[in-house]
């Protein structure tokens, strides 16, 4: 009986979490001229309109490029810091952890404003693509760090010592022993970095370059003057791209431990 209750509770939680996604996807097939639910007939017309909208297509390309660059930078830095924190930080271990998680303590808008003031103070000038990428790296680093740190905590140094006793140099020990064993944490952190960067709004809005718009920003600008099902089509494509990114990383890169 208790098992059935727990199953029912879990199903209710899943339904609560997935209901907004279902509504958005269903509304994207609306045949009417306004964004309503339930749909007034079924049609793919708004997907056609969306894919023919060069403004949205350019915003998607920008979001994908920024998310990819952010993922690479955050994964490289976060992995290095996680290894240092677990293996070499010593008494400073807790201080390093707190410093890496600090961006999570502030609202994103305050982080964006602080970065904006900092960029002007160092002479970076008007808002640039580089500034937006730096902002994305700042807010995604903690997630990479947490994932890789968790993987490092379960890493047995005996494997590395065995390789060292057999004559393997430091680079070989890292690439052939440590990295394959902590790969689930690295890939999980990279996945978080990509998704968060792709979907973030506040950092992008305040730090974006002149004439540059990511998909969330473009969708926000669109909804200020329009309320058509094209907005739902844009959101549905964004959801599909996120799911495809998860499946690609899981199947293509061999993620076996983390499940999302």
Image (cartoon, rainbow, N blue to C red):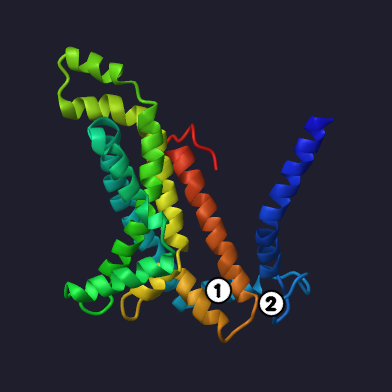
Horizontal side of residue 250 vs 21, given as left or right: left
Residue 132: percent from the left, percent from the top?
Answer: 32, 68
Horizontal side of residue 15 vs 205, given as left or right: right
Q: Nearer the viewer, residue 68 or 114?
A: 114
Q: Quadrant of residue 97?
A: top left
**Which residue is tagged 1?**
50
| Quarter placement of the C terminus | top right
Disc 2 versus disc 1: distance between alpha carbons? 14 Å
Q: Which-is-in-front pick, marks 2 and 1? A: 2
Residue 169: percent from the left, percent from the top?
Answer: 15, 23
Horizontal side of residue 89 vs 145, given as left or right: left
Compared with 28, 19 (above or below) is above
The furthest residue to the bottom: 225
Q: Nearer the viewer, residue 102 or 197?
A: 102
The local secondary structure at tag 1 comes to helix
Compared with 237, 121 (above or below) is below
**Which residue is tagged 2?**
35
Chain-order first, disc 2 or disc 1:
2
The residue under the point 80% across, 31% down is 2
Compared with 176, 220 (above or below) is below
């Amino acid at each position: 009986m208790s098992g059935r209750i727990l199953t029912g509770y879990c199903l209710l939680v899943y339904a609560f979490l997935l209901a907004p996604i279902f509504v958005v996807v269903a509304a994207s097939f609306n045949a009417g001229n306004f964004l309503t639910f339930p749909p007034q007939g079924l049609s793919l017309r708004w997907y056609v309109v969306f894919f023919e909208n060069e403004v949205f297509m350019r915003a998607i390309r920008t979001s994908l490029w920024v998310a990819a660059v952010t993922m690479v930078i955050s994964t490289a830095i976060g992995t290095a810091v996680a290894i240092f924190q677990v293996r070499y930080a010593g008494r400073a271990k807790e201080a390093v952890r707190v410093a890496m998680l600090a961006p999570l303590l502030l609202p994103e808008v305050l982080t964006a404003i602080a970065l904006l003031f900092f960029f002007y103070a160092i002479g970076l000038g008007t808002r640039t693509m580089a500034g937006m990428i730096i902002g994305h790296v700042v807010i995604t680093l903690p997630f990479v760090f947490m994932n890789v740190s968790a993987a490092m905590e379960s890493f047995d140094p005996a494997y590395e010592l065995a390789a060292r006793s057999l004559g393997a140099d430091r680079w070989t020990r890292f690439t052939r022993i440590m990295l394959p064993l902590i790969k689930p944490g690295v890939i999980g952190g990279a996945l978080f970095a990509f998704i968060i960067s792709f979907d973030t709004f506040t950092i992008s809005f305040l730090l974006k370059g002149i004439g540059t718009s990511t998909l969330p920003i473009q969708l926000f600008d669109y909804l200020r003057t329009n309320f058509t099902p094209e907005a739902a089509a844009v959101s549905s494509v964004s959801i599909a791209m996120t799911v495809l990114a998860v499946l690609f990383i899981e199947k293509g890169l061999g993620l076996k431990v983390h499940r999302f």
